[in-house]
Amino acid sequence: MKMISGFFHVRLPKPLAIALLFYFFITHYPVSSEPERKLQTLFVTADVLNVRIRPDKKSDKIGILPFGSKIQVERAQTFEIQNGAKIYWYYFPEINGYVFSDFLSETEPALGKKKAVLYKFYGDRCALYNKQRMTLYANTVDLYIDQQEEGGSCSTGLLRGKYTFRQNALVISGLKGMGLKDHCPSFDDNKTSIQELEKRLLTISKIKGDLILYYDPVLDGFVTENFAQDMTSNGWKINKSKCSFEKYSECKYSEKLILESEGYFCFTEHSL
C-alpha cells in the first residue's frame, strides 16, 4: 500500500479486483433475467380462435379468442406447412399459450356475422328461470339476460361492455343497460327507471364490478374463480353435457324434491 497525492493506493490481486468490479456492475446496473419480447399487434379473424398450451393443434386448449380481438403476440419458432407455405404459431403472453397465425391479421377485420356466443342457464323447476347469452366480438361484449320468477317478476334486457384478456382471465368491464324492460304483462314497471332496471339485471346476474372469467378445460367453459371447487364442496354434481352443476332441493310449491341447475358459460345452449 502506497501513499499517492494524499490518498492510499491499494494494489489488489487481479482475480479479486475483477470480482469486485463485477459485483459493483450487477448491483448498480441490474440486468433483466428475461429477454425483451418482440410483441406485435394482430387481430383475430376466426369466429373463435383456440389458445393452446403448446404450439401444436393436438395440444390442450386453455382458452379462446373471439373474432376481432386485438391482441399482443410474439412469433414462435414453430410453424406448419400449408400449401407449401410456412404458417407460424404465435405466443400470447396474457393467457400463456399459443395461437395459430392462419387466423390472425395485421389489419382489423370488418364487423360481420362472425361472433363468439356463450350461453349460461340457471334455475329450477320450482320458481326461477334465468337464461343468459353472451356475444363477444371486436373487444365488445353484449350480455342478454332473461329472468322469470314465480309471482310475476320478469326482467329482460341487454348489457353492453368491453372485454380484454389479463393474466389468464377474460375480463368484462363497463357493462351498461341497453333497451332494458320488464316483459311481464301483469307487472306494472312504468315507474321503474332505466338505472334501477340496469341494477336489477346486474344483481340477478351476480355481477359486481368487473366480471372476471377463467376458461376451465375440464368443463370446457368459462367460470369465475373457485366456482367449480365451491359448487362440488357444497354437494353439486357436474353435468358437463348441459354445462351446469345440479342438485335436488326442496320447493315450496311441491312435495317432491326438484332439480336445481347452476350453469356456467359455454358454447352450447341448454335449458332444464
Image: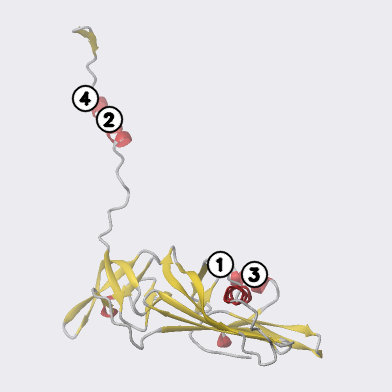
- For residue 143, the mark is none
Question: Comparing marks 1 and 4, which lies closer to the viewer?
Answer: 1
- For residue 19, the mark is 2
Residue extending furthest left?
A: 84
Of the numbered discs 2 and 4, the one sitting upstream in the chain is 4
Amino acid type, callout 2: Ala
Across the whole image, how many numbered discs are drawn on residues? 4
Q: Contact, CB < 8 Å: mark 1 with mark 4?
A: no
Amino acid type, callout 3: Asp
Disc 4 on helix, strand or loop? helix
Q: Is residue 1 visible?
A: no
Residue beneath label 4, please?
14
Question: Comparing marks 2 and 3, which lies closer to the viewer?
Answer: 3
- For residue 225, the mark is 1
> Residue 59 location in percent, x, y?
38, 76
**Quadrant placement of the C terminus:** bottom right
Question: Comparing marks 4 and 3, which lies closer to the viewer?
Answer: 3
Of the numbered discs 1 and 4, the one sitting upstream in the chain is 4
> Residue 146 location in percent, x, y?
59, 85
Amino acid type, callout 4: Lys
Name the side, left or right, on which 223 lies relative to 24: right
Alpha-carbon distance for marks 2 and 1? 48 Å
> 52 or 143: nearer the eye?
143
Alpha-carbon distance for marks 2 and 4? 9 Å
Residue beneath label 3, please?
230
Of the numbered discs 2 and 3, the one sitting upstream in the chain is 2
Q: Contact, CB < 8 Å: mark 2 with mark 1?
A: no
Local packing at callout 1 (Cα closer than 10 Å; few below 14, some 14-19, many 20+) is some
Disc 2 on helix, strand or loop? helix
